[in-house]
């Protein structure tokens, strides 16, 4: 996903292996040059301790983010490697 496609308020799916074991959904709070600050809104219950430790916030590289469709499912056309 390109950084220019990300805006404050967007709902995105992220996958960050270092901090979270499972994908999560978050809302963009701030956009940086190659990453975005997200508030974690929806996550796997197994990641509850991780989310609490992160105070429901995480910075994610744009290559680890996917846009969501209107029904909050990942948009396959924005999948990155």
Image (cartoon, rainbow, N blue to C red):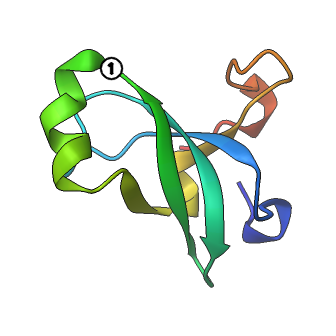
16 vs 63, left or right, is left
Q: Nearer the viewer, residue 48 or 17?
A: 48
Q: In the rendering, at what x and y percent does residue 3 appear?
A: 73, 69
8 vs 21, left or right, is right
49 vs 23, left or right, is left
- In this rendering, the answer to whether 58 lies above or below 22 is below
Quadrant position of residue 13 = top right
Q: In the rendering, at what x and y percent does residue 29 appear?
A: 63, 66
Q: In the rendering, at what x and y percent does residue 64 appear?
A: 50, 50
- In this rendering, the answer to whether 12 lies above or below 1 is above
Q: Nearer the viewer, residue 80 or 57?
A: 57
Q: Nearer the viewer, residue 55 or 16?
A: 55
Quadrant position of residue 49 = top left
Q: Residue at x 65, y 42 (%)?
A: 12
Q: Residues within 10 Å of mark 1 (few under 14, many from 20)?
A: few
Q: Residue at x 41, y 30 (%)?
A: 23
Quadrant position of residue 62 = bottom right
Residue indicated by mark 1: 44
Where's the N terminus, which quadrant?
A: bottom right
């Amino acid at each position: 996903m390109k950084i220019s496609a990300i805006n404050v308020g967007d709902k995105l799916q992220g996958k960050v292996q270092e901090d979270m074991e499972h994908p999560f959904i978050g809302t963009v709070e701030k956009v940086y040059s190659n990453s975005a600050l997200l508030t974690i809104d929806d996550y796997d219950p197994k990641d509850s301790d991780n989310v609490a430790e992160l105070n429901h916030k995480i910075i994610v590289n744009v290559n680890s983010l996917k846009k969501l469709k209107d029904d909050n499912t990942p948009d396959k056309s924005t999948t990155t490697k």
